[in-house]
C-alpha cells in the first residue's frame, strides 16, 4: 500500500532581476533635478540697470548671511546624528549634562549678530531703493504714465504725446519716471532685469524709478494675479540708443491712431494677447482721468489738491495742506 505524502517544503520563488538598484535610482533622480530647472529664468540675478544691480546684490548678501546659520546647523545635525547613534559605543555618554555657556554663546550670539547686520542693511537699502526716490543723473528723465488694464499694459509718453500698448521702448542710460495706476483689478508692474516691482491700484497713483544701462529686450509682466488673462499679461521693454528711441517716437507719431476717451473705453474691455499698438495722439487728461474716476462728487473731483477741497479748507480757516500731502500718490 502506497501512501502519497505531500511535500510541505516551501518552493522559493526566483525573484525577477532588478534593472536598477534603489541607490542608482536615487542618484538618477538627483541628477535629473537640475534638468527640471532648465526652463527657469534667472533674470533677477542678471540685471541690466543700476536699480536691478543693487536689488540683486541685496538678495545675494541677505541669502549669504542667512546661510551662515543654515548650513552649519544642517551639517551639525548630521554630525550629531551620526556621532551619537546607538551603535557608537566610543561617543561620550553624559546623561546628567544640562548646560554649556560656550554653546549658549554660539547658539544665541551668532544669530543675534546676523539679525542685527540684516536690520542695518535692510534699513539702509530700503531708503536707497525706495521706488519713489528719483535716480540721480545728468540726463533728463523720461516720463512714462502706466495704466494696467485687463489684461494688457498701456504706456503713455506725456513728453511726446504718444502711447504704446504692450511695448515699452526706453533710451539706454536715461532715468525712467513711472506714474502707475490701474483701471480696475490690482496688478503689479515688474521688469525683473531692471529692478523693483510696484503695485498698480485703481483710483491711486504710485511711482517707480528705473534705468536701463545696456541695450536689449527685457521681459515685463504683471506679478499679481488678476484673473483669467493674467498668464498672458506680458510686455516687452526695448532699451535702445537715443537715436533709435527718437526714431520710434516718429514711427508712433506716424501711426495715425488716436488714444481718446472712446478708444480707451474699447481698450478697457477685458482681452488678452493684444498685439502691440502705437498711438500718435493721446488725450493729455486721460491718465489723470483714470486716477480720478472714483473721486467724482457732484461734478467735482474730491482730491486733496482739487479746487473744491482748497476752497473748503480756506472757508473753514484751516491751515493749508503741506505740499507733499497735496497729491494722490501713495
Image: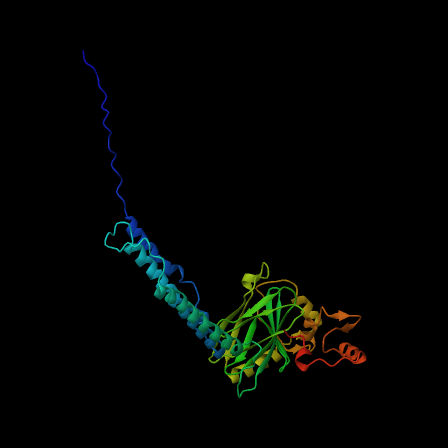
Q: Is residue 256 left or right of residue 81?
A: right
Position of the N terminus, as image quadrant, is top left
Q: Is residue 64 left or right of residue 154?
A: left
Image coordinates for residue 157, horizontal then vertical, percent: 61, 79
- Quadrant of the image occupied by residue 309: bottom right
Residue at the spot x=65%, y=80% of the render?
A: 324
Residue at the spot x=30%, y=49% of the render?
A: 22
Q: Is residue 71 left or right of residue 116?
A: left
Image coordinates for residue 319, horizontal then vertical, percent: 74, 81
Q: Nearer the viewer, residue 126 or 187?
A: 126
Q: Going by the picture, which residue comes out furthest to the bottom?
A: 138
Q: Is residue 224 above or below residue 163?
A: above
Image coordinates for residue 14, horizontal then vertical, percent: 24, 36
Q: How many marks?
A: 0
Q: Nearer the viewer, residue 175 or 243?
A: 175
Q: Is residue 239 left or right of residue 330?
A: left
Amino acid at each position: 500500500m502506497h501512501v502519497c505524502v505531500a511535500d510541505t517544503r516551501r518552493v522559493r520563488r526566483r525573484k525577477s532581476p532588478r534593472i536598477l538598484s534603489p541607490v542608482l535610482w536615487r542618484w538618477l533622480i538627483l541628477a535629473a533635478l537640475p534638468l527640471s530647472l532648465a526652463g527657469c529664468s534667472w533674470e533677477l540675478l542678471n540685471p541690466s540697470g543700476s536699480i536691478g544691480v543693487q536689488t540683486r546684490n541685496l538678495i545675494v548678501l541677505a541669502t549669504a548671511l542667512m546661510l551662515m546659520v543654515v548650513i552649519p546647523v544642517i551639517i551639525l545635525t548630521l554630525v550629531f546624528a551620526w556621532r551619537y547613534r546607538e551603535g557608537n559605543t566610543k561617543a561620550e555618554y553624559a546623561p546628567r549634562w544640562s548646560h554649556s555657556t560656550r554653546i549658549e554663546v554660539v547658539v544665541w550670539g551668532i544669530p543675534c549678530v546676523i539679525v542685527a547686520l540684516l536690520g542695518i542693511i535692510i534699513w539702509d537699502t530700503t531708503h536707497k531703493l525706495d521706488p519713489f526716490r528719483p535716480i540721480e543723473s545728468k540726463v533728463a528723465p523720461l516720463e512714462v504714465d502706466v495704466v494696467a488694464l485687463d489684461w494688457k499694459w498701456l504706456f503713455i509718453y506725456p513728453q511726446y504725446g504718444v502711447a504704446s500698448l504692450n511695448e515699452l521702448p526706453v533710451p539706454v542710460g536715461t532715468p525712467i519716471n513711472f506714474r502707475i495706476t490701474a483701471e480696475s483689478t490690482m496688478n503689479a508692474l515688474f521688469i525683473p532685469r531692471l529692478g523693483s516691482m510696484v503695485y498698480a491700484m485703481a483710483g491711486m497713483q504710485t511711482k517707480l524709478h528705473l534705468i536701463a544701462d545696456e541695450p536689449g529686450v527685457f521681459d515685463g509682466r504683471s506679478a499679481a494675479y488678476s484673473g483669467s488673462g493674467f498668464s498672458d499679461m506680458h510686455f516687452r521693454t526695448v532699451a535702445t540708443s537715443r537715436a533709435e528711441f527718437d526714431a520710434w517716437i516718429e514711427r508712433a507719431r506716424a501711426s495715425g491712431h488716436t488714444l481718446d476717451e472712446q478708444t480707451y473705453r474699447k481698450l478697457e474691455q477685458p482681452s488678452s494677447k493684444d498685439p502691440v499698438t502705437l498711438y500718435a495722439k493721446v488725450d493729455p487728461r486721460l491718465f489723470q482721468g483714470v486716477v480720478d474716476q472714483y473721486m467724482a462728487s457732484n461734478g467735482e473731483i474730491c482730491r486733496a489738491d482739487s479746487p473744491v477741497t482748497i476752497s473748503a479748507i480756506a472757508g473753514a480757516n484751516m491751515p493749508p495742506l503741506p505740499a507733499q500731502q497735496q497729491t494722490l500718490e501713495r
